Image: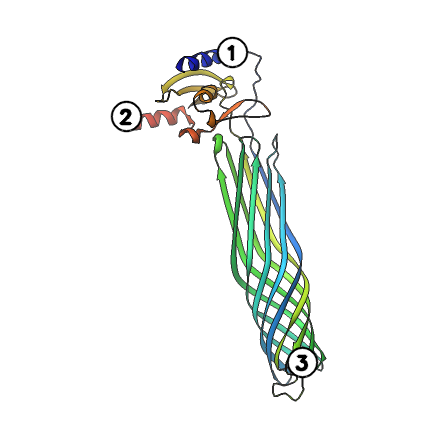
């Protein structure tokens, strides 16, 4: 095995200076960001109780609604081949418990409302980089508690039937996520967040259980329950991505190569410079790694150069000063 390694490395070292091999520029980095909001249908039910003093009407109301407020983003980063990313933030239901205070005139009741809001917020983000390859996928979801404020008009169509048009502004707070990968000595990161804040307009119908104007609670007093439908918009989401493709560890892209150490498994550590840089590194040769640890190697489909996942080897790519400092510390 050692003879095969030596022969392979020697052959490659002999041709690294040949014009047969391209000399690519150092890999570039790419940033990408995106933002989105959404709109959705809303459908649900409500139950409440009113008290009346003269023209003033006050009470409590609870509601719960289904929706599909999904803010989705697709992002392509400016690299060749391009990494692609997707993120989405979804609110699929919410509820409120609110106080109401209004002024009645004839068959109409104008009111303001506010109180507690709660709901489920989901956030997902993923990015796929063809150089590596690397795939990151992160998700989070939670039941959030926030606040709601709004206003509306009730119309007493019949003594026991109330029509309603209402507006709510709901804020369930912020949900965020972040993740990163350093596979194959590159760097791939993603972060996403959503502010689950949205506006809702609904039309509803309720059945009133005290349908006579002579009821002790007044014309608007008593318990009611019903349903509503409408629309919602908002849920502003954003995502940010960063991709620094790994530098190939292919011996064909290196010069001034000198062996500095050999590990117990026969893998060599070498001092070298890349063809495009004067910085001195200490690391491995991809062709040698392919013979001993093939699971730590990937061949880029675009340029066919070999890349090494240093993490699978339990190693780190270092500059020469970092290597010297580490070596000095081990001697001490």
Neighbour class for label 3 at 10 Å: few (<14), some, many (≥20)?
some
Residue at position x 31%, y 26% in the image: 328
Mark linked to residue 104: 3
Hey, which quadrant is residue 196 in on the image?
Answer: bottom right
Q: Badge 1, how many Cα within 10 Å: few under 14, some, many 20+?
A: few
Give the CA separation, mark 3 to mark 2.
87 Å
Secondary structure type for disc 2: helix
Relative to residue 77, is residue 26 depicted above or below?
above
Q: Secondary structure at mark 3?
A: strand
The x, y position of residue 246, in whole percent, is: 51, 29
The x, y position of residue 201, in whole percent, is 67, 64
Q: Which mark is residue 331?
A: 2
Residue 233, picture quadrant: bottom right
Q: Is residue 232 above or below residue 314?
A: below
Q: Residue at x 51, y 48 (%)?
A: 177
Q: Secondary structure at mark 1?
A: helix
Disc assigned to residue 15 = 1
Callout 1 touching callout 3 (CB < 8 Å): no
For residue 187, side relative to residue 325 (left or right): right
Whichever of labels 1 and 3 marks the residue nearer the N terminus, that label is 1
Q: Residue at x 58, y 13 (%)?
A: 20
Q: Is residue 19 above or below residue 281?
A: above
Residue that sits furthest to the left in the current view: 332
Q: Residue at x 53, y 55 (%)?
A: 174
Give how far apart the Cα atoms at labels 2 and 1 are.
36 Å
Q: Quick check: 164 left or right of 194? A: right
Q: Find residue 36 and report its horizontal and vertical position in percent.
A: 63, 49
Q: Which residue occupies the extreme front position in the image?
A: 1
Mark 1 → mark 3, Cα distance in angstroms:
92 Å
Colour basis: rainbow
């Amino acid at each position: 095995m050692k003879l095969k390694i030596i022969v392979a490395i020697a052959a490659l070292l002999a041709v690294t200076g040949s014009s047969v091999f391209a000399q690519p520029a150092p890999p570039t980095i790419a940033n990408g960001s995106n933002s989105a909001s959404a709109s959705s249908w809303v459908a649900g039910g409500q139950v409440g109780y009113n008290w009346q003093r003269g023209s003033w009407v006050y009470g409590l109301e609870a509601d719960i609604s289904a929706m599909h407020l999904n803010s989705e983003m697709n992002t392509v980063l400016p690299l060749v081949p391009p990494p692609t990313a997707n993120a989405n933030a979804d609110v699929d239901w919410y509820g409120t418990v609110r106080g109401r205070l209004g002024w009645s005139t004839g068959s109409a009741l104008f009111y303001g409302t506010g109180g507690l809001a709660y709901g489920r917020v989901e956030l997902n983000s993923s990015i796929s980089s063809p150089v590596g390859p690397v795939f990151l996928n992160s998700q989070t979801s939670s039941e959030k508690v926030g606040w709601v404020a709004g206003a509306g008009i009730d119309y007493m169509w019949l003594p026991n039937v109330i029509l309603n048009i209402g507006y709510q502004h709901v804020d369930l707070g912020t949900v965020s996520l972040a993740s990163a990968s350093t596979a194959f000595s590159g760097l791939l990161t993603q972060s996403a967040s959503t502010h689950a804040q949205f506006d809702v307009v609904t039309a509803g119908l309720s059945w009133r259980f005290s349908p006579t104007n002579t009821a002790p609670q007044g014309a608007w007093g008593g318990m009611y329950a019903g349903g509503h439908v409408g629309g919602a918009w908002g849920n502003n989401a954003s995502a940010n991505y960063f991709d620094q493709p790994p530098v190939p560890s292919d011996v064909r892209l290196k010069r001034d190569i000198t062996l500095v150490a050999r590990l117990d498994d026969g893998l060599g550590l070498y001092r070298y410079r890349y063809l495009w840089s004067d910085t001195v590194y200490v690391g491995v040769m991809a062709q040698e790694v392919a013979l001993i640890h093939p699971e730590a190697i990937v061949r880029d489909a675009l340029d066919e150069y070999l890349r090494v996942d240093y993490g699978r080897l339990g190693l780190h790519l270092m500059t020469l000063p970092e290597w010297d400092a580490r070596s000095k510390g081990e001697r001490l």
